Each structure stands twice: as C-alpha cells, then as structure tokens.
Amino acid sequence: MSDVLNELLAKERAAYAARNPRSRAAHDRADHLLGRVPMTWMAKSAAEFPLYLDRASGARVWDADGHELVDFCLGDTGAMAGHSPRATVEAVSRRYAELGGATTMMPTEDAAAVAEELTRRFGVSRWSFALTATDANRWALRLARALTGRPRVLVMSFSYHGSVDESFIVTGPDGPVPRPGNVGAPYDVTQTSRVVEFNDVEALERELAPCDVAAVLMEPAMTNMGIVLPEPGYLAAVRELTRRAGTLLINDETHTVSAGPGGCTRAWGLLPDVVTVGKAIAGGLPIGAYGLTGELAERALGRGDLDLVDTGGVGGTLAGNALSMAAARATLGEVLTEGAYDRMIALSARYTEGVRRLIDAHGLPWVVTQLGARSEYRFMAPGPRNGTESYLSTDAELEDYLHLYLLNRGVMLTPFHNMALMCPDTTEADVDLHLEILGAAVAALPG
C-alpha cells in the first residue's frame, strides 16, 4: 500500500471512529457475542467496529448515532425489495397479529400462490421452501444425488452458494484445493466435489466425463467475487454438456435475481433442471426456495425409498412457515414487480455509466459491470473471465478506503465487495450522490 493511500485510510478510520461513538460503545459492551456480533460476518468492517442499526426504511438506514445513510448494500441482496416495504409489512402484520400463527406445520394458501408465481418467473414448476438459500441448495443437492445415484457435485472456482459444504473448493496450480479459510470441513471437499473455472467449457467437459457428477451447482453469472458475466455461448454449452453427461443443472439465482423478475433464467432463456433462490423474495424475512422441473419432481415423488415426509434429510420444522409465505406473496405480487425491476435496472445503468465515466476520466485500471439492478467495479482491466482472476484483483486497502470514504459521507455499500444494488425506493438523486462522493474519493487517490 502506498504511503498516500495509507494516510488516506488512516484519516477515514479516525473520522469514522469520531462520528460513531454510540456504535463503538455498543460494540464494546457486546462481551457475550462471538466476535462481539450476532453473526460473525457482521464483524467484516473497514474500521475497528461495525455500525449498529437504529432503523431502516426503503433505501435508507439510520445508525445508532443518528446518521442517515443511502443504502446500496440492502442486506447484501436480502433487502432488495427495500427495507420494510409497505405491502410486505401489512401482509406480515395481518398474518402474525390478526390471523395469528407464524409457524404451525400447516400449509397456507399463500404458499401455493408463491409457488405459482415462482413458476411463472423461473419456468420450473414444482417448488418447496426453506429458510435460507443455503438450505435450498443443500436439499436440492441431496435430491440430485438421490435421483442420479452419483456422489459428486461440481461448482465454479470462487463461486458462492452459502455454507454448502460441497462448494468450498477452488482451482489451484496443482489441482483442486479447499477454499482458503474453510471452517471445520466435515470431509475432504476434493473427494466429494469437482471444480472448474467459470467460462471454461473445455474444463467442464473434462470434469463431467467420468459421469460421477450428480449436479452442476452454479450462478448463471458470478456475483460473490465481483460480477463475472458468461461469455457468448457459454451457458448453452453448460446445458448441452450436463445433459450429455446425465448431470443435473442447478441455477442458484439467490443474487442473480437482480437480473430481472425471473433472474438470469428468464432473462436469458435458460433451461435448468432446478432453480434455487432466497433472500430477496420475502422482503427481508428469512426464506429460501428450490424449484424442480415437473419431470424431476415426479421422479423424486415416485421413489418409495426416499423419505421426503419425515427425517430423510430434506426439510425443516420452520421451512414453509406461514409468516415467510405471507411475506413472499406480498413481496412478489406488489413490490418486486415488472415495473419495479424496470426502474431498478435503469438506475443501475445510470450508476454503471457514471462509474465508467469516472474510470475513463482518471485513467483507472478498473472495470465496472452491471447485472440488472446490481453493478460492481473491480480493480482490474480488462474485466475478469472467472472467479480466480477476480479474486486475484482484490485490493483490500483500496476497498476499505473507498468504503469508509463513502460511509463517512452517507453512502453504504456491502462490506464484502464493491457492489451497488438498487431497490424500488432508490432514486436518481441517490445514485448521483453516490457517484459524486465516489468521484471525490477517487480524486484524492495518488496518481
């Protein structure tokens, strides 16, 4: 890190500490929380302590010290519908306070309505629900192994599918290796999973050739390690190769749902065997879902040896609960609508073009990429073709500086990367403010 960047980062950290004494005090008191946070990811901060939430509404959050922040993080996609959207709040309130019953182990009509809408959006026609996309992915993989009789899973290097054990594998110079930092792996992931680079058709064909892969679990466009878009013809090749190998194809649309109402699956006319989704579809309440084609669903239901109604490894007591279903029905029906997506994507295009102008004006070796309502810049040019290339472009100090500069002036990004996400309540003024502050941050950098 250059001396100038070091000084700039130190200045922003000092300003952050000075303007957030209540968040610091709350953090200092949290002795009985692991890592002093309720979930260890919340410890990810460019400063010594995270901001504490006071309240949130639409595209805004207010921290414990009373600062109003324009939120482009949106719960890292979990609040893509905006914070506490009115229709979702009313549906949840009616279900919980008026009708009563958050979880009863009884189905509601809301669930069938949500499944019908997900079918309309994503194409696959038989849906089941979880509380997280991680569990949706886990259960989809269990079904894939059961129906194919194959043991292995294939993922893309530096992809992200929640805490699914089989996904923590990356490519290395001497072959597949566990992803760095994997906590308490229950088994050697190189024995259960195969891994290839995104956009590498030849490698995919090679790894599918042994015919021991039950499913390819992938995002249609990578999002966790920055946005990496598929090259022309790549996704068609993935579909052809998986069919030829007798391998199921699972599209994880948890983050790529930013591409449109039916994610990349609908926007790009994809034909997966399974779709998984979560986070955004219930307005911020815990939910996950996995959808199967009708043919695949019949195969699963027709297997008398699979315990799908008790303790066979698929399902959970709170999954499909009445509260989550009410929230999802309202969010999909009244908040994340076709019209809302049109506005969100247009705002993302405005932001993307603004960042591109900034990059060009300063001659920065960066790239900015849009995926529907989501946009992100990476510190490399040209842009990455795969997750490993994107991972190697990471500059933690520069990222911390930009995040703190924005945060200290009222704009919040997800702490994990440089993603800016739009929600139905985001405005052109919000986007322009973000661009103005980002421009000032870049102008202060050493040439």
Image (cartoon, helix red, strand yellow):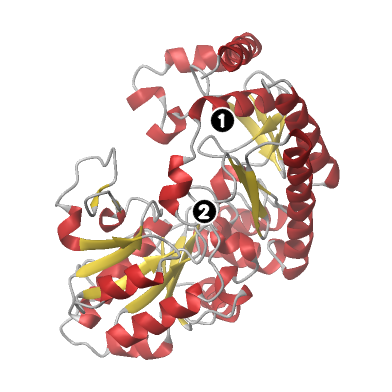
Q: Nearer the viewer, residue 133 or 98?
A: 133
Image quadrant in which you'd find residue 365: top right
The label on residue 399 is 1
> Which residue lies at the image location 18% right of the left edge and 62% below the top edge?
192
How far across and down, in percent of the image, does residue 312 sit? 19, 70
Residue kind at label 2, given as amino acid type = Thr
Where residue 291 sits: x, y (%)? 44, 75
Q: Is residue 138 above or below residue 46?
A: below
Asked if residue 88 is positioned above or below residue 114 in the image, the reply reads above
Q: Is residue 73 visible?
A: yes
**Residue drawn at (79%, 58%), measured in percent from left and top?**
346
Q: Classify 421 as above or below 253.
A: above
Looking at this view, name the residue that lies furthest to the right.
429
Q: Which residue is mark 2?
A: 223
Label 2 vs label 1: CA separation? Answer: 17 Å
**Up/down of 123 relative to 57, above or below:** below
Which residue shows up at 38% across the image and 91% down it? 295
> Viewed as shown, does residue 200 lie left or right of 299?
right
Side (left or right) of 114 relative to 176? right
Rendering coords of residue 208 (x, y %): 27, 75
- Front-most of 319 and 276? 276
- Give SS at disc 1: helix
- 127 displayed left or right of 406: left
Amino acid tagged 1: Glu
Question: In what element is the residue under mark 2?
Answer: loop
